[in-house]
């Protein structure tokens, strides 16, 4: 698996909207985020069509594909950040020029619905993509140090590093209120102990499952899975989707489950009940309440990269190829 060139100070970051439109983000929020990335030494440019907005708060397939192609073809662009997630990123997959993208590997980072695009590009083009902050995520004030630290470790250096749990987490709508947020103590939880090394795949669970049976789904055998879902899910739906993914492969080496939002009504009792249904999960390391997904802060991880997952003494993730 190839690794895109890392970001360096002075590089240009292109913002695209392959799912929902950037028009739903406030102009003030976009400008503040742009200034923050410029303070880190980057330049920021926008795709031509990211503010187009249709009946479902997205834009046409043609516009979204054009912005993706422009970003990968532009020699000045070194990394691509997504504006936001949504529901329809998988619509664009048959229309992408994967040969051109494969010849122009570069960082693509986002999460949630972007799982479809990132996974498809990794599968079809043979280079690592990234699950991590959207462009507006950098406007978050509190807990940004954790998020930014792992974004930089993953996308700006070549030295293997270790991810540890954040000390706090929040389920507040950070994009609406930066200063009156409720934080709780955070820790990663261990369902089953062990150590595993392997290639990492995953992201948003229901989005990843949309790729099953298509040419965009990676081979998951002997991989380590990272899965999460948002407030729309409930325990029964998560159990069904999780089972579907497990049945699509064999010999999973380890699993990390992102922290659930409160609205999902997922409790520790419910999650253990779901995991207990699968005897194979007792023989591999399984973590949950991990800092990725739809709560904050989140770390960045490499889709198609390689990691070591350990739940023995205390849970850590060693990122080795990214």
Image (cartoon, rainbow, N blue to C red):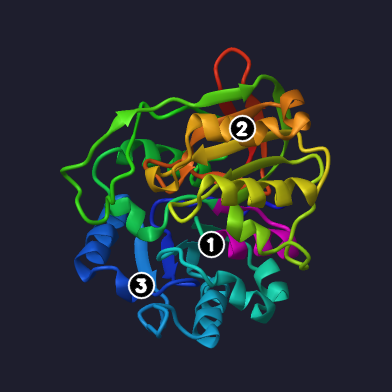
Label 1 Cα crowd, 10 Å radius (few <14 / some 14-19 / many 20+): many
**C-alpha distance separating marks 2 and 3:** 39 Å
Q: Which mark is residue 273?
A: 2
Disc 1 designates what residue? Answer: 114
Residue 113 horizontal/vertical position (percent): 52, 62
| Residue nearest the observer in this picture, 127 or 184 | 184
Residue 101 horizontal/vertical position (percent): 65, 70
Tell me which residue sits at (83%, 42%) in the image. 250
Residue 124 within the magenta-colored segment of the rendering: yes
Residue 65 horizontal/vertical position (percent): 56, 80
**C-alpha distance separating marks 1 and 3:** 14 Å
Q: Name the element at disc 1.
A: helix
Horizontally, is 110 left or right of 320 in the view? Answer: left
Q: Is residue 11 above or below residue 145?
A: below
Label 2 Cα crowd, 10 Å radius (few <14 / some 14-19 / many 20+): few
Disc 3 designates what residue? Answer: 22
N-terminal of the pair, mark 2 or mark 3, is: 3
Tell me which residue sits at (58%, 52%) in the image. 237
Quarter of the image for the C terminus: give it: top right
Residue at the top extreme of this rendering: 313
Q: Which mark is residue 300?
A: none
Q: Are marks 2 and 3 in contact (CB under 8 Å)?
A: no
| Residue nearest the observer in this picture, 129 or 247 | 247
Question: Bounds of the magenta span?
Answer: 114-130
Q: Is residue 233 above or below residue 289?
A: below
Tell me where residue 181 sits by quadrant: top left
Tell me which residue sits at (73%, 58%) in the image. 126
Label 3 Cα crowd, 10 Å radius (few <14 / some 14-19 / many 20+): many
Q: Name the element at disc 2.
A: helix
**C-alpha distance separating marks 2 and 1:** 29 Å
Horizontally, is 160 left or right of 247 in the view? Answer: left
């Amino acid at each position: 698996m190839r690794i895109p060139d890392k970001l360096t100070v002075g590089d240009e970051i292109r913002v695209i909207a392959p799912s929902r439109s950037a028009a739903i983000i406030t102009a003030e929020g976009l400008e503040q985020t742009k200034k923050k990335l410029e303070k880190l030494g980057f330049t920021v440019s926008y795709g031509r069509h990211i503010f187009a907005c249709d009946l479902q708060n997205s834009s046409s397939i043609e516009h979204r594909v054009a912005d993706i192609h422009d970003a990968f073809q532009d020699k000045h662009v070194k990394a691509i950040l997504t504006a936001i997630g949504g529901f329809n990123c998988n619509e664009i997959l048959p229309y992408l020029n994967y040969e051109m993208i494969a010849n122009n590997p570069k960082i693509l980072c986002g999460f949630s619905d972007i799982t479809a695009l990132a996974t498809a590009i990794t599968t079809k083009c043979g280079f690592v993509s990234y699950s991590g902050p959207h462009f507006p995520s950098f406007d978050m004030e509190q807990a940004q140090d954790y998020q930014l630290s792992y974004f930089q470790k993953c996308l700006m250096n070549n030295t293997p590093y270790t991810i540890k749990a954040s000390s706090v987490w929040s389920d507040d709508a950070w994009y609406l209120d930066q200063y009156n947020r409720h934080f709780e103590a955070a820790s990663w939880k261990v369902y089953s102990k062990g150590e595993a090394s392997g290639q990492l795949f995953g992201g948003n669970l229901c989005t990843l499952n949309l790729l099953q049976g298509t040419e965009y789904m990676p081979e998951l055998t002997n991989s380590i899975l990272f899965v999460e879902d948002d407030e729309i899910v409930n325990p029964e739906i998560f159990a069904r989707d999780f089972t579907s993914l497990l049945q699509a492969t064999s010999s999973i080496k380890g699993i990390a489950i992102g922290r659930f939002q409160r609205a999902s009504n997922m409790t520790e009792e419910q999650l253990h009940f779901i995991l207990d249904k699968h005897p194979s999960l007792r023989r591999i390391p399984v973590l949950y309440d991990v800092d990725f997904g739809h709560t904050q802060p989140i770390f960045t991880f490499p889709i198609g990269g390689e990691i070591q997952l350990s739940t023995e003494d205390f849970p850590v993730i060693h990122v080795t190829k990214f």
